[in-house]
Structures are given as C-alpha cells and as structure tokens.
C-alpha cells in the first residue's frame, strides 16, 4: 500500500473531512483544494521528513502522479484548461480550516471540535486488529516551542499571543530547568498490559495547551472521554509530575473513568502522611500503627542498583506489605471500601488478636502492642472514605517489585517524543512549524503522530515477519544489541594509530 493510500484510508475512516467541510464557508467559486486533500498533503509532507510548512504541503501535493492529482483535485479543469493547485489556494484552504476549528476567543486550550477531530484522526490511524490489543496508556508531556519571538518586556503583544513561557528540562549535567516560549504537547501512548505480549506503541490521544495552563489538567478531559468513545481505560502510567497534582485534578477523574493508576510518587508524597482511625497513611496504603518506621520510609530502587541491592530492597517492600491493612471489599458507588487489620488477616502476629498468635513465627510479630489500642486495632473492619489516599493510591504497592516492573512500561511515552524530536526525521524544535496559534500547530502535530503511527506499524510488521522467518528456520527471535559502553570498556579500548 502506498503512503498516500494509507493516509487516505485513515482520513476516510476517521470521518473528519466531511465534518470540516460542513464548517467551512461557501464562496462564489468552489474551492479547488478540499479538506480531505489538505489533510492528505499534510500527512505526505510529514512522511517525507519535511518541516510543517504550507509550502512543503503544496510541494507534496503537486509532486504526486497525475492520476492522483486529478483524483484529489490538485489538477482541476477550468474554462481555460487544466489548472494545477497554487500555493495561495493551499494557504487559503488551510486558513479557513484553522479559523473554523479555532475558538472565537482564543485562550490557550483547543476548542472542543478541534480536539474531537484530532482524537478521531489518531484513533483511525490505529489498525482494527490492534484497537483492543491493550488498554494501557503511558502519558507524558513535552515542550513545543512557538516560532514567534516572545513579547518584549512590559507588553504582551507578539505574533503568537496564545503561547506563553514554560519550563523544560535542559538535559545537561546540572538539574536546572530552562525557559521556552510556546506550548505543552501531551500524548498518550498505547503500551502492553502486564504479563501480556508486546504491542505496537501507537499514539492514541494527544493535545496541545498553552504553557499558562497546567498540562495535566488540560489532558485529563481527553483521557476521560475515551470510555464514552468505546475505548476502555486500563493502566495509566505516569510520572511524579502527574501524581503530585491535587487528587481532583488527576487521580480522582481517572479512577472515575475506570483507569488504574501506576505512577511514581513525588518525594513530598512518599512516607508517612498522617493517620486514619489509628492506621498510618503511607505511600497510598494504610499500615498497622506498629509498622517499623524504616519500612514506611522506603524509597524507589536506584536506577543503577545491583542485583543484590534489588533483592534486598524487594525483601523490605515484601515485609512492609505484611503490615498493610488488607482490602476486603471493592469501592461502593460513593468510593468507600473496607479494610481489615493485618493480624486479623493472618499476615502478622499481634497479642491484640489472640488468634494470630497461633500462626507460625515466620511472620512479623508485634512485640510491644500499645496499652490503649487504636480503633483500627479493636474493630473487626475499618471503613475508608474516598478522600483517604485519594492522591497516592494506585494499582501496586509503592515501591514494590510489582510496581517497579509495571511502571517500567512508561518509557514508551519517552520513546514517542524522542521520535518526534529526532533531527533525522521530523524535528519539532523551533522552526519546524512557522504558523502561529494553537490550532495550526495542533493540526500539524496530530498529522505528525498519524505518520508516526504508520511508521510504527510498518516497523512492527517487518519485525514480526523477520521473527516468523527465523522461527521457520529454527532460529530464536532477534534480540536487541546492548549498545551501552561502560567506563571499563572505554578505558581498555585500543586507541587508533
């Protein structure tokens, strides 16, 4: 299938072209360039590693074979004979589309009709055979710099008034952030489920927001709208930048939409954070009041930890899990659930629960029970309201081995942005798109993700075919070569003459 045919199939499956055409004004003379052909030209320009310039879109359309140009209306019959599309016609149609999809009063967030059209385009770029392959999403945001220069000091007038100052990592040795002028680009990337086979890492949702808006709050409505579109939410993998937001801004809406959070906790949210009915609140769970403080203050495993250090860390998190109050009911309609003392559940030995003292001594034992027991120690069960651990509760105990392995899937979001910022392909750094405003930038950004999904699908099919060929030949699947070089390897390498 040719690239043009693939892009036309995505555009037709999304159904966005007729909807856009219905929004455009009707002139005295019919437009030669339709919205469908414009979207196809934008995808073709990105597929050829061209920057997001309208001149490149025009070049991509007029470079097609004559038959395709006729079919798309790039060449049309006028009264003086065949007429080929001009750049001014391309600019005119794109301007009409951008105006129709923009807000009447721009405020730095996409209009509802623009977001829906971008969602439908991205969803149509995911093949039918993979739509139900996984419900897990890795989410993140990155910077998208505007081509406009920032306004001078003391004024807000500039060529792109919707853009704003934002912070980004500079990837240098120092850990400082640097300022940039533009937008936050958020995306949700499909990842495999836990203990499930690999899937292509398709971009399923994306949005753009001015840096004056919180990217987390801007992306939440996009994610929570997915179940209504027939796409259930499963694991949502996010870093501490998402987890540190107020519960009402991130965790609660995602849980209400059916998502299970797997996220890194911000350092300020780790460790003991108060009590509920005497039980200690820590790392998204309730623990016995007699839990050793060192177990409650465990942090995540260091990236460069040795196997021995990892085993010791996992042993401590497994011991901490024994002190955790066990859930004995699911959340009701109001978000309440019930938990039980770990001694009553047979996980630890405690004199306050005489039946637990008959357990084997391999379990932890409370040697000095409190003289005046807390409510969680005397009651058979404890009711937990939704506001307790609303911000930090997640699928796996933090920072256990199960959480670490599940959270490792979040790197798919980093890979997606790395391909979008690859200088050898479509580098979205400043100058990639010279159009001003959120709507033009978002249209080009989403078409770039559509192209990336097609590249991901092609690479996946090639890899699967190679694995099938090797399996038929009795060979194991090809594995990735380790490219990381240690200091020892560099120090002992032979110097060239």
Image (cartoon, rainbow, N blue to C red):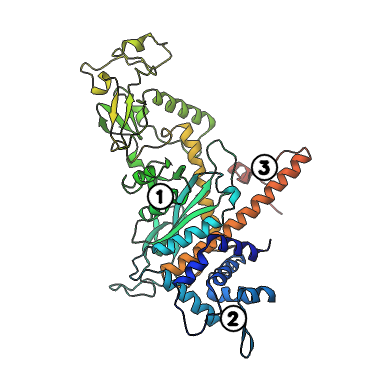
Between 39 and 19, the one nearer to me in the picture = 19
Q: Is residue 331 above or below residue 323?
A: below
Asked if residue 46 can be seen in this view, the reply is: yes
Q: Is residue 239 above or below residue 120?
A: above
Which residue is denoted by mark 3 in the rendering?
479
- State the CA–CA distance, disc 2 to disc 1: 41 Å
Residue 367 coordinates in the image, percent (x, y): 31, 14
Which residue is denoted by mark 2 in the rendering?
85
Q: Residue at (52%, 37%) from the top-left corner?
A: 194
Residue projecting furthest to the right = 473
**Within 10 angstroms of label 3, few (less than 14), some, or many (20 or more) residues?**
few
Task: Please identify the quadrant where the C terminus is shown.
Answer: bottom right
Q: Earlier in the sequence, mark 3 or mark 2?
A: 2
Between 48 and 270, the one nearer to me in the picture = 48
Q: Earlier in the sequence, mark 3 or mark 1?
A: 1
Between 238 and 194, the one nearer to me in the picture = 194
Residue 215 coordinates in the image, percent (x, y): 38, 56
Label 3 vs label 2, nearer the camera = 2
Residue 351 quadrant:
top left
- State the CA–CA distance, disc 3 to disc 1: 37 Å
- State the CA–CA distance, disc 3 to disc 2: 48 Å
Which residue is denoted by mark 1 in the rendering?
224
- Tag 2 and tag 1, C-beta contact below 8 Å: no
Residue 32 coordinates in the image, percent (x, y): 56, 79
Q: How many marks?
A: 3
Q: Which mark is residue 274?
A: none
**Within 10 angstroms of label 1, few (less than 14), some, or many (20 or more) residues?**
many
Label 3 vs label 1, nearer the camera = 1
Q: Earlier in the sequence, mark 2 or mark 1?
A: 2
Residue 158 coordinates in the image, percent (x, y): 36, 75
């Amino acid at each position: 299938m040719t690239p043009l045919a693939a892009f036309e199939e995505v555009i037709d499956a999304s159904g966005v072209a007729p909807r856009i055409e219905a929004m455009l004004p009707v002139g005295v003379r019919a437009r030669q360039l339709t919205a469908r052909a414009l979207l196809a030209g934008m995808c073709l320009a990105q597929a050829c590693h061209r920057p997001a310039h309208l001149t490149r879109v025009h070049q991509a359309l007029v470079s097609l074979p004559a038959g395709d140009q006729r079919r798309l209306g790039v060449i049309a019959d006028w009264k003086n004979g065949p007429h080929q599309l001009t750049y001014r016609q391309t600019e005119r149609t794109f301007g009409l589309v951008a105006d129709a999809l923009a807000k009447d009063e721009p405020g730095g967030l996409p209009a509802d009709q623009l977001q829906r059209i971008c969602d439908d385009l991205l969803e149509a770029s995911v093949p039918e055979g993979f739509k139900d392959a996984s419900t897990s999403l890795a989410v993140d945001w990155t910077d998208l710099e505007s081509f406009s220069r920032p306004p001078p000091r003391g004024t807000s007038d500039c060529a792109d008034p919707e853009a704003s100052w934002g912070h980004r990592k500079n990837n240098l040795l120092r850990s400082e952030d640097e300022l940039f002028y533009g937008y936050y680009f958020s995306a949700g990337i499909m990842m495999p489920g836990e203990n499930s086979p690999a899937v292509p890492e398709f971009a399923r949702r994306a949005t753009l927001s001015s840096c004056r808006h919180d990217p987390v709050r801007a992306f939440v409505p996009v994610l929570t709208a997915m179940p209504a579109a027939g796409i259930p939410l499963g694991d949502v993998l996010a870093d501490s930048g998402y987890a540190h937001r107020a519960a009402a801004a991130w965790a609660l809406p995602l849980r209400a939409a059916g998502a299970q959070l797997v996220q890194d906790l911000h350092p300020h949210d780790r460790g003991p954070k108060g009590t509920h009915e005497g039980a200690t609140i820590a790392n998204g769970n309730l623990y016995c009041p007699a839990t050793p403080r060192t177990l409650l203050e465990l942090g995540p495993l260091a990236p460069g930890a040795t196997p021995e250090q990892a085993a010791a860390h996992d042993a401590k998190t497994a011991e901490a899990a024994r002190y955790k109050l066990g859930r004995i009911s699911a959340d009701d309609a109001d978000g309440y659930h019930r938990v039980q003392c770990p001694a009553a559940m047979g996980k630890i030995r405690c004199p306050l629960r005489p039946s637990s003292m008959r357990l084997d001594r391999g379990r932890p034992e409370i040697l000095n029970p409190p003289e005046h027991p807390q409510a969680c120690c005397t009651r058979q069960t404890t009711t937990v309201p939704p506001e307790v651990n609303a911000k930090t509760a997640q699928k796996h105990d933090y920072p256990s081995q199960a959480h670490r392995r599940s959270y490792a899937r979040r790197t798919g979001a980093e890979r997606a942005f790395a391909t979008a910022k690859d200088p050898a392909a479509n580098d979205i750094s400043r100058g990639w798109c010279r159009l001003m405003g959120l709507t033009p930038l978002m249209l080009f950004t989403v078409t770039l993700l559509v192209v990336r999904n097609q590249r991901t699908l092609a690479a996946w099919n090639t890899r699967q075919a190679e694995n099938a060929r090797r399996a038929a030949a009795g060979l194991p699947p090809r594995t990735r070569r380790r490219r990381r070089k240690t200091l020892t390897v560099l120090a002992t390498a032979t110097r060239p003459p």
